[in-house]
Image (cartoon, rainbow, N blue to C red):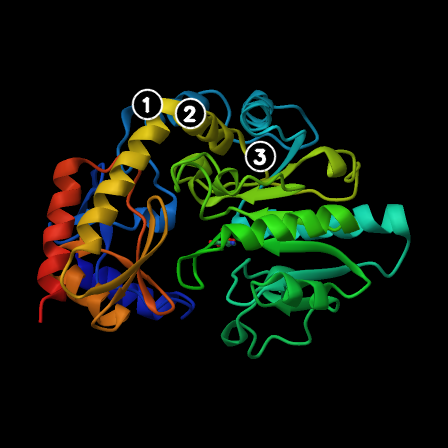
Amino acid sequence: MQFEEIERLDREYLAETYARFPVALVGGSNATLLGADGTQYIDFGAGIATNVFGVGDEGWKRAVIDQLNKIQHVSNYYYAEPQVRLARLLCEKTGAKRVFFSNSGGEANECALKAARKYSFEKYGEGRSRIVSLKGSFHGRTLFTLTATGQEEFHRYFGPFVPGVSYAEATLSSVKAACGRDACAVIIEPVQGEGGVRALDAAFVQALAAFCKERDILLVCDEVQSGNGRTGTLYAYEQYGISPDIVTTAKGLAGGLPIGACLFFEKTEHTLKAGDHGSTFGGNPVSCAAGCYVMERLDRDFLLEVKGKAAYLRAKLGGMEGVEEVTGLGMMIGLSTRFPPKQVAAECLRRGLLVLTAHDKVRLLPPLTVSKTEMDEGLTILSEVLKK
Ligand SMILES: *Cc1c(COP(=O)(O)O)cnc(C)c1O
C-alpha cells in the first residue's frame, strides 16, 4: 500500500486515539528505518524504547522464530519453558524472588498496585490501602494506573476514579503528608518518562526508601520505560542505591513484542496466590523467548557500551546550539530546546530523523544498538533543525 492509502484507511477505520506523524514505517535495519514511500529515517525513538536492538537484529529474530516453530501460545493452565527461563533470568539479575508476567506496562503496574493492597490487607487488615504517586508521573491507561498517574490532563472524562490514591511532590515532606496513616505503597518512576524525562533526585529517592522501610510502606519502582538497559544499568533504581519491594517493567523487555513484568522482592514474594490475579496472554512464550534473548544480551559489556553511547550523545547535545538543557539518565534523554518540542519533532521528521516528545521536552530513546554513524547522522539533522 502507498502511504496515502494507509493514512486514508487509518482515518476511516481506526479509533481516533492517536495524533500520528505522517509516516508509515515498513522496515529497516538497526536504527535506520524505511517509510512506505521509500524514505529513510534515523530512529531516535525505538518505538518508544521497545526496539532495544533496533530493527532486524538477527539474534533476536532467531530467538523469536525458533519459538514460533515450536508453539505460539500456551495457556497459563499449563507450564511453559520460556516463562520460567525469563523469570529466572530476571530474578538472578536483580535479586527479585518471583515474577508475574502480563502484556503491557499498564498491566504490570496494575498487578503491582493490587499486590501492594493485598500485602497490607493480610498484614494490617482493611483500610490501609492508600497508594501514593508523584505529580508528573505516568503509570498507564487502566483505570487504577490512570488514577495513579499524577497528571490532571489524563484525568478528564474518566471519573469516578479508584479511591485511595494521593499525589505528592518529589519531596519527602510531601510524600509523608500524602501517605497519612493509611498508605500501603508509594510508586515512583526513578526517571519520569512521559512527564518530561526527569531523573528524580538521588537524595530524595534514598530518603523515601528509608521512610518506606521504616513504615513498612512498599516502594514500587515503575521501570516500564527506564528499565532493560535504557539508562546504562539493567534497571535505573540500581543507580540510586535503593532496594525496591516491587519493580515493574515492560517496553524494552522483549525487544519489541508485547510483554509486562512485575518483579516481587522478599516482602511480597508470597503475596499473590492462585486465583488472585492472572492474564490470558501474560507470559506468552514468543514474547518470553524474545525477553530471554534481550536479558542474556544485556550483560556488563553491553551496558558499558550503552553508557559510552549515552555519554557521547549527551556531550554533543549539551554543546548544541538551541539546546537549553539535557535531562534524564543514560539513553533516556530529554531536551529543552529553543523551539516547541512538537515543532522540533515535525521538522526532524521532514529531514529524516524520528524523535519523540514528552511534555515540555524533545525526547530521545534510540535503540541501544544505535551505531556511531547513525548517532552522528541524527545529531546533524537535529542541529540543523535547532539552528535559528
Ligand atoms: C509506557 C509506560 C507505561 C504504560 O505502558 P503500556 O505498555 O502503554 O501500558 C507505564 N509506566 C511508564 C513509566 C511508562 O513509560
- Residue 211 visible in the snapshot: yes
Residue in the foreground of this view, choosing between 14 and 333: 333
- The residue lying at 9 percent from left, 72 percent from top is 388
Q: Circles 1 and 3: CB distance less than 8 Å?
A: no
**Alpha carbon distance from label 1 to label 2:** 8 Å
In the rendered image, residue 314, in percent from the top left (x then y), is placed at: 25, 48
Most extreme residue toward the right, as rendered? 125
> Of the residues shown, which amino acid type is indicated by label 1?
Gly
Which residue does the image show at 21% across and 72% down from the upper left?
339
Please report contact status of discs 3 and 2: CB closer than 8 Å, yes or no: no
The label nearer to you, 3 versus 2, is 2
Query: Crowding at label 3, few (<14), some or many (≥20) Cα neighbours within 10 Å?
Result: many
Give the mark nearest the N terminus, 1 or 3. Answer: 1
Q: Amino acid at mark 3?
A: Gly
Q: Position of residue 204 (x, y in %)?
A: 56, 55
Q: Residue 354 at x, y = what percent?
A: 22, 55
Give the CA separation, mark 3 to mark 2.
15 Å
CB under 8 Å between discs 1 and 2? yes
167, above or below 312, in the image? below
Relative to residue 27, is residue 88 drawn left or right? Answer: right
Q: Looking at the picture, does residue 41 appear above or below residue 304?
A: below
Amino acid at pointer 2: Tyr
- The image position of residue 43, as x and y in percent, is 23, 48
Identify the element where label 3 is drawn. loop
Point out the tag, 1 or 2, that comes first from the N-terminus.
1
Which residue is under mark 1?
Answer: 59
Q: Could you tell whether 299 is left or right of 6 in the image?
A: right
Determine which residue is flagged by label 3. Answer: 283
Q: Which residue is mark 2?
A: 293
Of the residues under marks 3 and 2, which one precedes in the sequence?
3
